[in-house]
Image (spheres, rainbow, N blue to C red):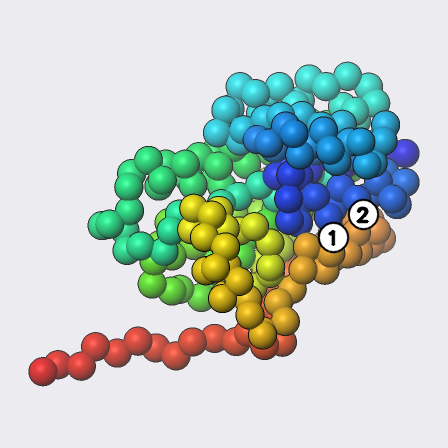
Amino acid sequence: MKTILITGATAGFGEAAARKFVSGGWRAIGTGRRGDRLKKLQDELGDNFLPLEIDMRDVPAVESLARLGTPWGDIDLLLNNAGLAPPTDPLPETDWERVETVIDTNITGLVALTRVLLPKLVERKGQIINLSSVAATYPYKGGAIYAGTKAFVRQFSLDLRCDLAGTGVRVTSVEPGMAETEFTLVRTGGDKEASEKLYAGMNPMTPQDHADLFWWLANLPPHLNINSIELMPVTQSWAGFAINREA
């Protein structure tokens, strides 16, 4: 039986992935800040799901995941899913505390966890799936911090493949567009109306869509590596250039 470690398993992509992989016969370790949600997920999924209440900003706690005993410590797939964004205020108007939280979660915690798990992943010829975003490629006003962290994740994934050449470990950067999760609720401080307005009538992607994608990536033949994959709902496309007219 294989084991997946999923960060950010309390909602959205991570929660859907936990269900997908456990139903497919895997063990799943799920981390997150909301212990009550993890417990509820364990009640649903049973003994093949291990809930661990961990904040990605707590580097010692993150690094402790490398010390899990058998069988949970025999990790075959790391799904670096945990992430968040500050409000879409221009950088001069964004509180430094919010900036730090995003960087510590999206970059520092992700790198710390990946680094400490690499010996086991190399030993088991495992796999790493990192959640980046289309924001890493397509800029928008108010996205400097979030998009910057996701550009880091994309480039980190590609360069990590270079470091792991010859080990058999696969690394993929997954770069989604608009998907209806709690992402906007978190970004807006719980503004349900803003979240519903954003996704209204546009048929966004779903957590299940991404869980199916992760499952497909995990079950590809071991000699194949998807370096990066960008996906959007059909209704989403790119904005034009912004132009400021002189008076």
Residue 41 picture quarter: top right
Q: Which of 207 and 129 is in front in this view?
A: 207
Q: Mark 2 points at which residue?
A: 20
Provide the residue designation for mark 1: 211
Which image quadrant is residue 175 in?
bottom right
| One can see residue 157 in this view | yes
Residue 134 vs 11, above or below: the answer is: below
Q: What secondary structure is found at the residue carrying circle 1?
A: helix
Q: Which residue is drawn at 28% across and 55% down?
A: 90
Q: CB under 8 Å between callouts 1 and 2? A: yes
- Which residue is at a point 45% across and 60% down the rendered structure image? 194
Q: What residue type is labelled 1?
A: Ala
Residue 203, given in percent of the width and then of the height, sits at 63, 71
**Front one among 23 and 223:** 23
Please rate how many residues cluster around mark 2, counting C-alpha atoms within 10 Å: few if below 14, some from 14 to 19, many from 20.
some
First in residue order: circle 1 vs circle 2: 2
Residue 88 appears left or right of 82: left
Q: Position of residue 151 (x, y in %)?
A: 46, 53
Q: Which mark is residue 191?
A: none
